[in-house]
Amino acid sequence: MKICVLPGDGIGPEITAEAVRVLRALDLPLEFAEAPIGGAAYRALGHPLPESTLDLARRSDAILFGAVGDFSLDTLPRELRPEQAILGLRKAFNLFANFRPARVYPELVHASTLKPEIVAGLDILIIRELTGDIYFGQPRGIRTLENGVREGFDTMHYSVPEIERVAHVAFQAAMKRGKRLCSVDKANVLDTMQLWREVVTAVGKAYPEVELSHMYVDNAAMQLLKNPKQFDVIVTGNLFGDILSDEASMLTGSIGLLPSASLNDKNFGLYEPIHGSAPDIAGKGIANPLATILSAAMLLRFSGGLEAAAQRIENAVEKVLAQGYRTGDIAEPGLRTVGTKEMGDAVLAAL
Ligand code: IPM
Ligand code: MG
Protein backbone atom coordinates (compact mmCIF):
# COMPACT_ATOMS: atom_id res chain seq x y z
CA MET A 1 0.00 0.00 0.00
CA LYS A 2 1.06 3.53 -0.73
CA ILE A 3 0.29 5.74 2.22
CA CYS A 4 0.22 9.50 1.85
CA VAL A 5 1.26 11.11 5.14
CA LEU A 6 0.00 14.65 5.74
CA PRO A 7 1.30 15.81 9.15
CA GLY A 8 -0.05 19.39 9.02
CA ASP A 9 0.10 21.91 11.84
CA GLY A 10 0.64 22.13 15.57
CA ILE A 11 1.04 18.68 17.12
CA GLY A 12 0.29 17.04 13.72
CA PRO A 13 3.94 16.23 12.86
CA GLU A 14 4.65 14.77 16.33
CA ILE A 15 1.67 12.44 16.40
CA THR A 16 1.86 11.25 12.79
CA ALA A 17 5.55 10.42 13.29
CA GLU A 18 4.57 7.95 16.03
CA ALA A 19 1.82 6.39 13.91
CA VAL A 20 4.24 5.92 11.01
CA ARG A 21 6.77 4.27 13.35
CA VAL A 22 4.06 1.85 14.46
CA LEU A 23 3.03 1.06 10.87
CA ARG A 24 6.64 0.51 9.83
CA ALA A 25 7.16 -1.94 12.68
CA LEU A 26 4.49 -4.28 11.30
CA ASP A 27 6.66 -5.59 8.47
CA LEU A 28 3.96 -5.06 5.88
CA PRO A 29 4.62 -3.90 2.30
CA LEU A 30 3.80 -0.26 3.02
CA GLU A 31 5.32 2.75 1.29
CA PHE A 32 5.17 6.22 2.81
CA ALA A 33 5.35 9.62 1.14
CA GLU A 34 4.85 12.90 2.95
CA ALA A 35 3.51 16.28 1.81
CA PRO A 36 2.67 19.61 3.47
CA ILE A 37 -0.94 20.47 4.32
CA GLY A 38 -2.81 23.23 6.17
CA GLY A 39 -0.96 26.19 7.61
CA ALA A 40 2.36 24.47 7.00
CA ALA A 41 1.51 24.21 3.29
CA TYR A 42 0.31 27.80 3.17
CA ARG A 43 3.62 28.95 4.58
CA ALA A 44 5.69 26.73 2.29
CA LEU A 45 3.66 26.90 -0.94
CA GLY A 46 1.05 29.63 -0.53
CA HIS A 47 -2.00 27.33 -0.34
CA PRO A 48 -3.39 25.08 2.45
CA LEU A 49 -4.09 22.27 -0.06
CA PRO A 50 -1.45 22.62 -2.79
CA GLU A 51 -1.91 20.81 -6.11
CA SER A 52 1.29 18.83 -5.41
CA THR A 53 -0.20 17.50 -2.16
CA LEU A 54 -3.47 16.57 -3.91
CA ASP A 55 -1.46 14.78 -6.61
CA LEU A 56 0.44 12.73 -4.07
CA ALA A 57 -2.86 11.80 -2.39
CA ARG A 58 -4.32 10.77 -5.76
CA ARG A 59 -1.40 8.43 -6.32
CA SER A 60 -1.88 6.79 -2.89
CA ASP A 61 -4.14 4.09 -1.47
CA ALA A 62 -4.90 5.96 1.75
CA ILE A 63 -4.13 9.18 3.60
CA LEU A 64 -2.80 9.37 7.14
CA PHE A 65 -3.61 12.86 8.34
CA GLY A 66 -2.37 14.71 11.42
CA ALA A 67 -4.19 17.99 12.09
CA VAL A 68 -4.61 21.45 10.58
CA GLY A 69 -5.25 24.80 12.20
CA ASP A 70 -3.08 27.75 13.11
CA PHE A 71 -4.49 30.74 14.99
CA SER A 72 -2.01 33.10 13.40
CA LEU A 73 -3.58 32.38 9.98
CA ASP A 74 -7.19 32.94 11.07
CA THR A 75 -7.32 36.38 9.49
CA LEU A 76 -6.61 35.03 5.99
CA PRO A 77 -9.49 34.93 3.50
CA ARG A 78 -11.53 31.79 4.17
CA GLU A 79 -10.25 29.91 1.10
CA LEU A 80 -6.67 30.16 2.37
CA ARG A 81 -7.31 29.14 5.98
CA PRO A 82 -5.73 25.87 7.13
CA GLU A 83 -9.16 24.23 7.73
CA GLN A 84 -9.90 24.46 4.03
CA ALA A 85 -7.31 21.73 3.48
CA ILE A 86 -9.31 19.06 5.26
CA LEU A 87 -12.61 20.26 3.77
CA GLY A 88 -11.00 20.26 0.32
CA LEU A 89 -9.66 16.71 0.73
CA ARG A 90 -13.06 15.44 1.87
CA LYS A 91 -14.66 16.98 -1.21
CA ALA A 92 -11.88 16.02 -3.66
CA PHE A 93 -12.05 12.34 -2.74
CA ASN A 94 -15.78 12.22 -2.04
CA LEU A 95 -15.16 11.03 1.53
CA PHE A 96 -18.81 11.09 2.51
CA ALA A 97 -18.83 8.54 5.32
CA ASN A 98 -17.02 9.51 8.49
CA PHE A 99 -16.62 6.81 11.16
CA ARG A 100 -16.02 8.17 14.65
CA PRO A 101 -16.02 5.38 17.22
CA ALA A 102 -15.96 6.20 20.93
CA ARG A 103 -14.91 3.43 23.31
CA VAL A 104 -14.16 3.58 26.98
CA TYR A 105 -11.13 1.50 27.95
CA PRO A 106 -11.60 -0.22 31.32
CA GLU A 107 -8.46 1.44 32.71
CA LEU A 108 -9.73 4.88 31.79
CA VAL A 109 -13.22 4.77 33.28
CA HIS A 110 -12.09 7.36 35.81
CA ALA A 111 -10.62 9.68 33.18
CA SER A 112 -14.11 10.63 32.03
CA THR A 113 -15.80 13.61 33.64
CA LEU A 114 -18.96 11.49 33.89
CA LYS A 115 -19.62 8.97 36.65
CA PRO A 116 -17.91 5.61 36.02
CA GLU A 117 -21.19 3.68 35.97
CA ILE A 118 -22.49 5.90 33.15
CA VAL A 119 -19.51 5.28 30.86
CA ALA A 120 -18.04 1.88 31.85
CA GLY A 121 -18.11 -0.43 28.85
CA LEU A 122 -19.26 2.29 26.45
CA ASP A 123 -18.74 1.42 22.78
CA ILE A 124 -20.57 3.59 20.28
CA LEU A 125 -20.00 4.52 16.67
CA ILE A 126 -20.98 7.87 15.19
CA ILE A 127 -21.29 7.93 11.42
CA ARG A 128 -21.22 11.51 10.25
CA GLU A 129 -22.06 12.54 6.69
CA LEU A 130 -19.03 14.51 5.59
CA THR A 131 -19.41 16.13 2.17
CA GLY A 132 -22.80 17.83 2.30
CA ASP A 133 -25.02 19.90 4.58
CA ILE A 134 -24.47 23.51 5.59
CA TYR A 135 -20.69 22.92 5.40
CA PHE A 136 -20.75 23.01 1.62
CA GLY A 137 -24.18 24.48 0.82
CA GLN A 138 -24.49 27.45 -1.52
CA PRO A 139 -25.31 30.28 -1.38
CA ARG A 140 -23.35 31.45 1.61
CA GLY A 141 -21.65 34.64 2.52
CA ILE A 142 -21.78 37.91 4.39
CA ARG A 143 -23.75 40.67 2.67
CA THR A 144 -25.08 44.14 3.32
CA LEU A 145 -28.83 44.55 2.98
CA GLU A 146 -30.51 47.56 1.40
CA ASN A 147 -31.08 49.09 4.83
CA GLY A 148 -27.34 48.93 5.46
CA VAL A 149 -27.52 46.03 7.93
CA ARG A 150 -24.88 43.31 7.44
CA GLU A 151 -25.95 39.67 7.67
CA GLY A 152 -24.29 36.30 7.41
CA PHE A 153 -26.00 33.37 5.69
CA ASP A 154 -25.34 29.70 4.95
CA THR A 155 -27.49 27.07 3.28
CA MET A 156 -28.34 23.64 4.64
CA HIS A 157 -29.29 21.06 2.06
CA TYR A 158 -29.22 17.32 1.46
CA SER A 159 -30.25 15.47 -1.66
CA VAL A 160 -31.90 12.05 -1.54
CA PRO A 161 -28.83 10.22 -3.00
CA GLU A 162 -26.56 11.90 -0.43
CA ILE A 163 -28.77 10.72 2.42
CA GLU A 164 -29.25 7.25 0.93
CA ARG A 165 -25.57 6.43 0.55
CA VAL A 166 -24.60 7.39 4.09
CA ALA A 167 -27.68 5.62 5.45
CA HIS A 168 -26.61 2.40 3.69
CA VAL A 169 -23.14 2.69 5.20
CA ALA A 170 -24.67 3.19 8.64
CA PHE A 171 -27.09 0.26 8.38
CA GLN A 172 -24.26 -1.98 7.18
CA ALA A 173 -22.06 -0.87 10.07
CA ALA A 174 -24.92 -1.57 12.49
CA MET A 175 -25.30 -5.07 11.01
CA LYS A 176 -21.69 -5.78 12.02
CA ARG A 177 -22.26 -4.48 15.55
CA GLY A 178 -25.28 -4.40 17.86
CA LYS A 179 -27.85 -4.02 15.04
CA ARG A 180 -29.25 -0.78 16.47
CA LEU A 181 -29.15 2.47 14.55
CA CYS A 182 -30.24 5.88 15.80
CA SER A 183 -30.65 8.55 13.14
CA VAL A 184 -30.20 12.05 14.57
CA ASP A 185 -31.92 14.99 12.88
CA LYS A 186 -33.92 18.15 13.53
CA ALA A 187 -36.98 17.11 11.56
CA ASN A 188 -39.27 19.09 13.86
CA VAL A 189 -37.85 22.39 12.58
CA LEU A 190 -35.82 21.93 9.38
CA ASP A 191 -37.19 20.76 6.01
CA THR A 192 -33.81 19.30 5.06
CA MET A 193 -34.02 17.14 8.14
CA GLN A 194 -37.59 16.09 7.46
CA LEU A 195 -36.33 14.66 4.17
CA TRP A 196 -33.38 13.09 6.02
CA ARG A 197 -35.75 11.20 8.32
CA GLU A 198 -37.97 10.10 5.43
CA VAL A 199 -35.05 8.75 3.40
CA VAL A 200 -33.32 6.99 6.31
CA THR A 201 -36.64 5.31 7.14
CA ALA A 202 -37.04 4.16 3.54
CA VAL A 203 -33.47 2.80 3.34
CA GLY A 204 -34.13 0.94 6.60
CA LYS A 205 -36.66 -1.29 4.84
CA ALA A 206 -33.71 -3.09 3.26
CA TYR A 207 -32.28 -3.88 6.71
CA PRO A 208 -35.12 -5.50 8.66
CA GLU A 209 -32.70 -6.90 11.24
CA VAL A 210 -31.56 -3.43 12.28
CA GLU A 211 -33.68 -1.66 14.89
CA LEU A 212 -33.96 1.93 13.64
CA SER A 213 -34.83 4.85 15.88
CA HIS A 214 -34.90 8.60 15.32
CA MET A 215 -33.89 11.34 17.71
CA TYR A 216 -33.79 15.13 17.54
CA VAL A 217 -30.29 16.48 17.85
CA ASP A 218 -30.94 18.50 21.00
CA ASN A 219 -32.26 15.41 22.75
CA ALA A 220 -29.34 13.35 21.40
CA ALA A 221 -26.90 15.85 22.92
CA MET A 222 -28.65 15.35 26.24
CA GLN A 223 -28.99 11.56 25.99
CA LEU A 224 -25.26 11.23 25.26
CA LEU A 225 -24.59 12.63 28.72
CA LYS A 226 -27.54 11.04 30.48
CA ASN A 227 -27.30 7.48 29.22
CA PRO A 228 -24.73 7.09 26.42
CA LYS A 229 -24.85 3.29 26.53
CA GLN A 230 -28.34 3.33 25.00
CA PHE A 231 -26.62 3.94 21.63
CA ASP A 232 -24.96 1.47 19.29
CA VAL A 233 -24.56 3.29 15.95
CA ILE A 234 -25.61 6.92 15.39
CA VAL A 235 -25.96 8.35 11.88
CA THR A 236 -26.28 12.07 11.36
CA GLY A 237 -25.50 14.98 9.07
CA ASN A 238 -22.28 16.92 8.77
CA LEU A 239 -22.93 19.78 11.21
CA PHE A 240 -24.66 17.76 13.92
CA GLY A 241 -22.03 15.01 13.57
CA ASP A 242 -19.24 17.53 14.08
CA ILE A 243 -20.74 18.63 17.37
CA LEU A 244 -21.95 15.27 18.71
CA SER A 245 -18.65 13.54 17.97
CA ASP A 246 -16.71 16.06 20.06
CA GLU A 247 -19.25 15.55 22.83
CA ALA A 248 -18.97 11.76 22.56
CA SER A 249 -15.19 11.95 22.73
CA MET A 250 -15.40 13.41 26.21
CA LEU A 251 -17.30 10.36 27.44
CA THR A 252 -14.07 8.43 26.91
CA GLY A 253 -11.93 10.74 29.01
CA SER A 254 -9.90 12.38 26.29
CA ILE A 255 -10.27 13.53 22.74
CA GLY A 256 -6.65 12.37 22.43
CA LEU A 257 -7.81 8.77 22.13
CA LEU A 258 -10.33 8.91 19.32
CA PRO A 259 -9.47 7.87 15.78
CA SER A 260 -11.57 8.39 12.67
CA ALA A 261 -11.94 7.15 9.14
CA SER A 262 -13.42 9.16 6.27
CA LEU A 263 -14.32 6.89 3.39
CA ASN A 264 -15.62 7.07 -0.15
CA ASP A 265 -17.42 4.28 -2.00
CA LYS A 266 -14.12 2.73 -3.17
CA ASN A 267 -12.62 2.18 0.28
CA PHE A 268 -10.18 5.00 -0.28
CA GLY A 269 -9.94 6.78 3.01
CA LEU A 270 -8.47 9.58 5.03
CA TYR A 271 -7.56 8.60 8.58
CA GLU A 272 -7.10 11.17 11.28
CA PRO A 273 -7.43 11.70 15.01
CA ILE A 274 -10.63 13.61 15.73
CA HIS A 275 -8.77 16.23 17.77
CA GLY A 276 -7.20 19.33 16.27
CA SER A 277 -3.72 20.81 16.02
CA ALA A 278 -3.56 21.85 19.72
CA PRO A 279 -1.22 24.83 19.16
CA ASP A 280 -0.90 25.35 22.94
CA ILE A 281 1.13 22.14 23.33
CA ALA A 282 2.71 21.93 19.86
CA GLY A 283 6.42 21.15 19.80
CA LYS A 284 6.52 20.19 23.46
CA GLY A 285 6.51 16.44 22.84
CA ILE A 286 3.62 15.84 25.23
CA ALA A 287 0.66 15.27 22.87
CA ASN A 288 -1.14 11.93 23.02
CA PRO A 289 -0.31 9.96 19.83
CA LEU A 290 -2.82 7.17 20.51
CA ALA A 291 -5.70 8.64 18.47
CA THR A 292 -3.41 8.80 15.44
CA ILE A 293 -1.98 5.35 16.08
CA LEU A 294 -5.54 4.00 16.31
CA SER A 295 -6.36 5.86 13.07
CA ALA A 296 -3.50 3.96 11.44
CA ALA A 297 -5.18 0.74 12.59
CA MET A 298 -8.41 1.86 10.92
CA LEU A 299 -6.42 2.60 7.76
CA LEU A 300 -5.14 -0.97 7.62
CA ARG A 301 -8.64 -2.33 8.27
CA PHE A 302 -10.73 -0.22 5.88
CA SER A 303 -8.37 0.67 3.03
CA GLY A 304 -5.97 -2.28 3.32
CA GLY A 305 -8.31 -5.10 4.29
CA LEU A 306 -5.65 -6.02 6.87
CA GLU A 307 -7.87 -6.87 9.81
CA ALA A 308 -5.28 -8.88 11.74
CA ALA A 309 -2.68 -6.11 11.54
CA ALA A 310 -5.28 -3.55 12.62
CA GLN A 311 -6.11 -5.66 15.64
CA ARG A 312 -2.43 -6.02 16.52
CA ILE A 313 -2.20 -2.24 16.82
CA GLU A 314 -5.43 -1.98 18.81
CA ASN A 315 -4.30 -4.74 21.18
CA ALA A 316 -0.96 -3.00 21.67
CA VAL A 317 -2.74 0.24 22.59
CA GLU A 318 -4.92 -1.61 25.07
CA LYS A 319 -1.83 -3.19 26.55
CA VAL A 320 0.07 0.07 27.11
CA LEU A 321 -2.98 1.56 28.81
CA ALA A 322 -3.25 -1.53 31.01
CA GLN A 323 0.47 -1.21 31.78
CA GLY A 324 -0.21 2.27 33.14
CA TYR A 325 1.35 4.49 30.48
CA ARG A 326 -0.46 7.83 30.34
CA THR A 327 0.11 11.04 28.41
CA GLY A 328 -0.73 14.32 30.16
CA ASP A 329 -4.33 14.46 28.93
CA ILE A 330 -5.15 11.21 30.75
CA ALA A 331 -2.57 11.44 33.55
CA GLU A 332 -3.47 9.85 36.87
CA PRO A 333 -1.63 10.07 40.17
CA GLY A 334 0.48 6.96 40.73
CA LEU A 335 0.71 6.10 37.03
CA ARG A 336 3.52 6.84 34.64
CA THR A 337 3.08 10.11 32.70
CA VAL A 338 4.98 9.91 29.42
CA GLY A 339 5.52 12.10 26.39
CA THR A 340 4.52 11.53 22.77
CA LYS A 341 7.61 9.59 21.79
CA GLU A 342 7.71 7.45 24.94
CA MET A 343 4.08 6.53 24.31
CA GLY A 344 5.07 5.51 20.77
CA ASP A 345 7.96 3.47 22.22
CA ALA A 346 5.56 1.73 24.60
CA VAL A 347 3.22 0.79 21.75
CA LEU A 348 6.17 -0.54 19.72
CA ALA A 349 7.31 -2.60 22.69
CA ALA A 350 3.79 -3.98 23.14
CA LEU A 351 3.66 -4.90 19.44
C1 IPM B 1 -13.59 17.96 12.50
C2 IPM B 1 -13.13 19.39 12.55
C3 IPM B 1 -13.31 20.02 11.17
C4 IPM B 1 -14.80 20.04 10.91
C5 IPM B 1 -12.71 21.41 11.00
C6 IPM B 1 -11.22 21.43 11.29
C7 IPM B 1 -12.95 21.96 9.62
O1 IPM B 1 -13.77 20.09 13.56
O2 IPM B 1 -13.04 17.19 11.69
O3 IPM B 1 -14.49 17.61 13.24
O4 IPM B 1 -15.51 20.96 11.30
O5 IPM B 1 -15.27 19.09 10.25
MG1 MG C 1 -15.01 18.85 14.76
Image (cartoon, rainbow, N blue to C red):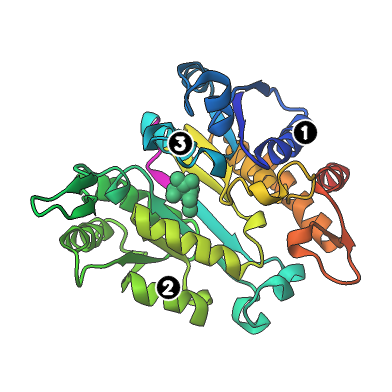
Q: Is residue 69 above or below residue 43?
A: below
Q: Is residue 320 above or below residue 261?
A: below
Q: Is residue 94 visible?
A: no
Q: Amino acid at mark 2?
A: Ala
Q: Amino acid at mark 3?
A: Arg
Front tag of 1 and 2: 2
Residue located beneath label 1 in the image:
21
The stretch of residues the image draws in magenta is: 93-98
Residue 236 placement: quadrant:
bottom left
Front tag of 1 and 3: 3
**Residues at badges 1 and 3 in contact (C-beta under 8 Å)?**
no
Q: CA distance from mark 1 to mark 2?
A: 37 Å
Of residue 29 and residue 331, the one placed in the foreground of this image is 331
Is the residue marked by circle 3 packed among few (<14), some (14-19), or many (20+) residues within 10 Å? Answer: many
Residue 192 drawn at (x, y percent): 19, 57
Q: Is residue 172 above or below residue 77?
A: below
Residue 231 drawn at (x, y percent): 47, 71
SS state under label 3 = loop
Residue 1 drawn at (x, y percent): 61, 23
Of residue 201 and residue 277, the one placed in the foreground of this image is 277
Of residue 179 and residue 45, the one placed in the foreground of this image is 45
Q: Main secondary structure of the magenta part?
A: loop
Identity of the residue drawn at 54% across and 21% down: 60
Q: Of the numbered discs in the image, which one, if any, rests on residue 221? A: 2
Q: CA distance from mark 3 to mark 2?
A: 29 Å
Residue located beneath label 3 in the image:
81
Decide whether residue 153 is among the magenta residues: no
Residue 103 placement: quadrant:
bottom right
